[in-house]
Image (cartoon, helix red, strand yellow):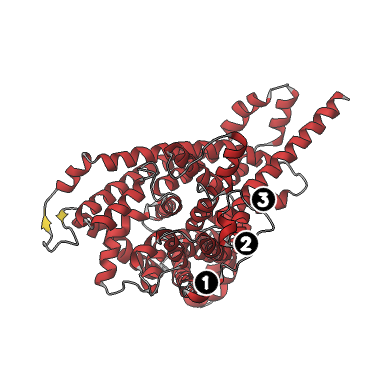
Amino acid sequence: MKKTARSVAFEVAFYLVVILMITAMLFPLIWTFETSLKDKASILSRSPEWWGFRIENNYYEPFMVEGYMKPLLNSVLTALGCVILTVPLAFMAAYAFSRFKIFGAPTMYFWSLTCRMGPEAAFIIPYYLMITKLGLYDTTFSLILIYSLFNLPLAIWLVKSGIDGIPKAIDEAALVDGVGISDLLRHVILPVAAPSIAAASILVFIFSWNEYLFASVLTALRSRTITVGLLQFVTTVGIRYGNMAAVSIVALLPTLITVVILQKYIIAGLTLGAVTSE
Amino acid sequence: MAKFRPWYLLVPAVSLLAFIDFAPFFYGIYLSFLRWIMTSPTPPIYVRFDNYGFLVNDSEFLGAFVRGITFAAVSIACQLVLGLGTAFIMLRKFRGNIVFKVILTLPLAVAPIAVGSMWRIMMFPGLGPIPYYLQEFFGIHWDMAANSTAAFATVVMMDTWHWLPLAALILLSGIASIPQPLLESASIDGVSVLQKLRFIYLPLIKFEVLFVVLLRGMDAFRIFDEIWMLTGGGPGDTTRFLSISLYTLILRGWDIGYGAAISLVYLYVIIVMCWVLYQAVMRVSE
């Protein structure tokens, strides 16, 4: 009897902790979403207003009046461009790394680790000077180039782990039959390695979308991305919190949706393959 | 087939990397030997190691470094302890555990800059609900914009919110792979929960723990976006970590030579730390 009482208490405590954690994880997202719908008075009211506040469309002003559509479009172009540049290169390099002993291949993992870990701030000066000298300042192309560098090693590494799973005998059989290398890659390797290529593409997209530091240094009005646009709310006099919340929601929604739909790829990629279960 | 060596498949990737990785690196070394303020009309002059000499006595730089270490240590500790707890929750196949997992991974995808703005909306004194409730129910005056302890704690909380899921998932993969018979025999022998944690779980998930320390430690050292958005490095210099310090130095003074010197030292310290931790991880995994 005593035991069941204890286990019931344990059950209750367990679910309380679960509910508490879910609340803590969702609260910032929900609160920001609510803020994006409030009018000024409700946002600044002394006690937090949970419901029944006056609704105002804070999305309208930044996106329709102040031209925030442009940064949004730039973000899409930059992230897609980065995927288009990085993934084919990564695919070719990953095949070479997977099939042949190449100098430096064993340290590849460490290399991709340092590219993910390297402090971006330490690259500002040379990149800024090089990009301005090349006349690429404030272009989407310069951002694509630089993001590709930071994502390429990770992409190579992810695709390589996919190609490693394909038996080498398949390539050899194809080559004996007189199939060229490009046909081999396109018709034999590509379909089998597709899941890992998809994973790499998604991660490259997310990382490029989320990047702020380089975008803030290398772009001005013409090709700034949505993350740069978001920070501009802080620097203006008297932060417009409602609009800031609205732009935050728009900036985080694409990657949030991706992570919900494509969970397992993202976790494998973020942990560099250390977690692949489920 | 021994002759078949398509090294040319590597050419595009390697040349891209050479152009945008190695070139800036050597260019950065060259710049660090110059005295060059971009906004002043004086042309750059070669000053050898002067910039590195400044750096050794630069209290701003050293302070930022120490703050970075403190921040990394505190946030890693939080994420390991809470992450372990969360991993045990996820290990249990309770009703709704799939939903729990999905919700838990949401913060991982959010753009760091948006994390910063969300926490600003939530925590800013006079605006956010958290300081209000702390004041109302506990009498704690939580002023992130003026009190340095509150600012530091807020930054740690934000980082934990953002990255706890990653720590939990890595630790979970370790715990899930512990052989079941081992745990069963331990509970038959009447081993207490703490002993189990100390003598069974922790030794067996050493790799995962170290991996979390590696990933999160390096991330904590490069953190920029979230904090730039949330506090801007303030109040005072409480949350001015290396990246922020460097960024403001460059954009305020355009002191290219000195900035380049700090960048290189910063990069080098990170690579060495990463290498040491990486070796530790690899040794454990063998």
**Horizontally, is B249 left or right of A215 in the view?**
left
- Within 10 Å of disc 2 (Cα), the crowding (few <14, some 14-19, many 20+) is few
Determine the chain carrying the residue at label 1. A
**Label 1: which residue?**
A61
**Which residue occupies the foreground of this view, B160 or B151?**
B151
Kind of residue at disc 2: Leu
**Horizontally, is A42 left or right of A67 in the view?**
right
Q: Position of residue A231 (x, y in %)?
A: 43, 61
Q: Secondary structure at mark 2?
A: loop
**Label 3: which residue?**
B101
Determine the chain carrying the residue at label 3. B
Q: Secondary structure at mark 3?
A: helix
Q: Secondary structure at mark 1?
A: helix
- Within 10 Å of disc 1 (Cα), the crowding (few <14, some 14-19, many 20+) is few
Residue drawn at x 37%, y 39% as measured from the top left: B67
Kind of residue at disc 1: Glu
Residue drawn at x 29%, y 64% as measured from the top left: A128
Judge whether A10 appears above or below B168 on screen: above
**Which residue occupies the foreground of this view, B232 or A121?**
B232
Res. B15 in view:
yes
Which circle's residue, 2 or 1, is located before the other in the chain? Answer: 1
Q: Position of residue A224 (x, y in %)?
A: 41, 69
**Label 2: which residue?**
A262
Q: Are marks 2 and 1 in contact (CB under 8 Å)?
A: no
